[in-house]
Image (cartoon, rainbow, N blue to C red):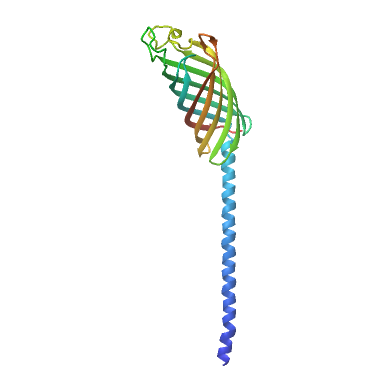
Amino acid sequence: MAVGLLAGAIAPANAQTVTQTQSKKRKQESHAHHETNATRLARVARTTEETYSHRWEIFGGGGYLRFRSGEYLRRNNEISWATAANYYFTPKFAVVGNAQGSFGNAHAITNNEFGVYNPQINEYMFMGGVSYRFVAKEKFAVSAQAVAGTSWGIFSGGSKGIPATDLGLWDSGLRPAFSLAVNADYNLYPNLALRFTPTWIGTNFVGPTGSTIQNNLGFNLGILYRFGRQ
């Protein structure tokens, strides 16, 4: 009987000890989990700060432009190269300069007397302005930019010596240009990202009725490299 009573007294004590041990282990695991989350958040904050504390961003790539090549002509498809450089005064605000060249074949006047219907045309844009980054996360960023400058249209180069205006194209030369764009960046590393830029380009080439505003839509895609420290 004494042995039975002793065993009965020990069993609850052992059960209580096991319960306390398990509770302590769960608390330790929970505490370790909280520490892991805190460590992760600290790492994300460090990476984000490192990414957007660079003073310079350099972009290079290519793209597509849907261009209006004449006052009464259909739009044509063009392939582009594009470059840009941003200098950041703060993690959000920067000045930007960019250059772009676009190449394609225009849709000349149908049944024109010269028999030239798809002459090659080129446009080059050199612009500068401002950029503002309104989303800055560890893996992605979004910014908007507005630039203006000059465009150089070469519309007679592929027309076999025929003046571009005789084919319904714009007159070749230097004219004002301006652009609005949104930059979407996917960060591979703090100093390296993929950039996709939907863009609107307004040109001011001269046609039969004088200068007009041409609305051209397109996009650029390429690599963004960051360097320097603010």
Q: Where does residue 203 sit, x and y in percent of width and height?
A: 53, 17
Q: Residue at x 59, y 40 (%)?
A: 49
Q: Where does residue 212 sit, x and y in percent of width and height?
A: 55, 14
Residue 161 is left or right of residue 128, and the answer is left
- Quadrant where the C terminus is found in the figure: top right
Q: How many marks?
A: 0
**Above or below, 156 relative to 63:** above
Q: Residue furthest bottom?
A: 1
Q: Where does residue 54 sit, x and y in percent of width and height?
A: 57, 34
**Above or below, 45 relative to 172:** below
Q: Residue furthest left?
A: 115
The residue nearer to you, when weighing 188 against 211, is: 211
The residue nearer to you, when weighing 181 against 76, is: 76
The residue nearer to you, when weighing 143 against 200, is: 200
**Above or below, 165 relative to 99:** above
Q: Name the image quarter holding residue 164.
A: top left
Q: Residue at x 40, y 6 (%)?
A: 162
Q: Name the image quarter holding residue 96.
A: top right
Q: Where does residue 42 sit, x and y in percent of width and height?
A: 59, 48
Q: Residue furthest front?
A: 111
